[in-house]
Amino acid sequence: MALKLWASSTANALKISCSGAKTPPLLPFSISRCFSSVLDGLKYTSSHEWVKNEGSVATIGITDHAQGHLGEVVFVELPEAASSVSKGGSFGAVESVKATSDVNSPVAGEVVEVNTKLTETPGLINSSPYEDGWMIKVRPSSPSELDSLMGPKEYTKFCEEEDAHH
């Protein structure tokens, strides 16, 4: 009960609402459910990975929504640089205090960089899923695969519908 009261007070102080209200224009994200963010400029999968296209390289990680459901991340398994990933194929795993989940690649291509910080500090996925908690960088073999992924609005709606069924 104290935690619920604290969360409510904190949300009120920060002017955060779970009612689906419009995001203030100065914030670079939208609130999809309490304390879960979806960033503009990224693409999303139905298995809760995000991808940021940066020219010839795509940065990939798991969403804030996913890490919130997993709980505290305690171990991350990642591929080696120069390995290949396939669209929809597993490239690693995230182990939390609750469960272990495969992480799937939104695009096919060659892994050009791996976030080695996650080996020592897997909790970066919880504290900074879209920045310090990125997992791999891939050179997509077919950049047009990004076109089939969800944008922020579609992903937000997907998460709301998914949460309503659980």
Image (spheres, rainbow, N blue to C red):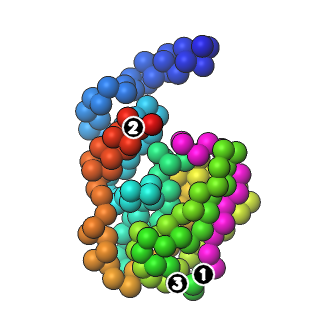
Circle 3 residues within 10 Å: few <14, some 14–19, many ≥20: some
At label 3, which amino acid type do we have? Ser
- Which residue bears the numbered disc 3? 84
Question: Which element type, helix, strand or loop, lies under badge 1?
Answer: loop
The residue furthest front is 165
Residue 101 percent coordinates (x, y): 59, 57
Looking at the rendered image, the disc whose residue lies closer to the viewer, 3 or 2, is 2
At label 1, which amino acid type do we have? Ala
Looking at the rendered image, the disc whose residue lies closer to the viewer, 1 or 2, is 2
Front residue of 50/98: it is 98
- Quadrant placement of the N terminus: top right
Residue span colored magenta: 68-80
- Which residue bears the numbered disc 1? 81
Nearer-N-terminus badge (3/2): 3
Verify CB contact (< 8 Å) between mark 1 and mark 3.
no
Nearer-N-terminus badge (1/2): 1
Kindly identify the residue that appears in the image at 27 percent across and 48 percent down: 153
The residue furthest right is 120
Residue 35 percent coordinates (x, y): 46, 34
Residue 12 percent coordinates (x, y): 43, 18
Kindly identify the residue that appears in the image at 43 percent across and 31 percent down: 34
Residue 118 in sight from this viewpoint: no
- The mark tally for this picture is 3
Verify CB contact (< 8 Å) between mark 3 and mark 2.
no
- Which residue bears the numbered disc 2? 165
- Quadrant placement of the C terminus: top left
Q: Is residue 87 above or below residue 70?
A: below
Circle 2 residues within 10 Å: few <14, some 14–19, many ≥20: few
Residue 118 percent coordinates (x, y): 66, 61
Question: Which element type, helix, strand or loop, lies under badge 3?
Answer: strand
Residue 150 in sight from this viewpoint: yes
Q: Is residue 10 above or below residue 49?
A: above
